[in-house]
Amino acid sequence: MELKEIQGYLYFFFILFLTAILYGYIVHLYRSEKKGERDYEKYGKMALDDELDSKPVEPLDENDVNEKRSGK
């Protein structure tokens, strides 16, 4: 086998690997939205509604805010 032939096979399998990762991510997004865990349409609208006084996409949890302030 020549180097070009090995590079061709590696390129092909790398593209297959990246395609599988992409489809896995799409399925993950679809399932998490169906379960009601996240609403990704809100995140898409975040780019359109980008003002300082805009309301947050998700409400902040007070426990998370306190942990970040205390450095835990």
Image: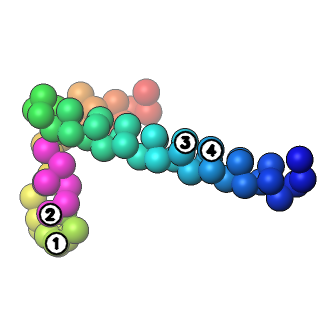
Of badges 1 and 4, nearer the viewer stands 4
Of badges 2 and 4, nearer the viewer stands 4
Q: Which residue is mark 2?
A: 45
Q: Which is nearer the eye, 21 or 43?
A: 21
Residue 48 at what x, y percent from top left?
Answer: 16, 72
Of badges 3 and 4, nearer the viewer stands 4
Of badges 1 and 3, nearer the viewer stands 3
Q: What is the secondary structure assignment of the residue under circle 3?
A: helix
Q: Amino acid at mark 2?
A: Lys
Residue 51 at what x, y percent from top left?
Answer: 17, 72
Q: Which residue is mark 3?
A: 17
Circles 1 and 2, Cβ within 8 Å, touching? The answer is yes
> Quick check: is 69 in the magenta stretch?
no
Residue at image location 88% in from the left, 54% down from the top: 3
Alpha carbon of mark 2 to alpha carbon of mark 4: how far?
A: 36 Å
Q: Amino acid at mark 3?
A: Phe
Q: Left or right: where does residue 5 sit relative to residue 18?
A: right
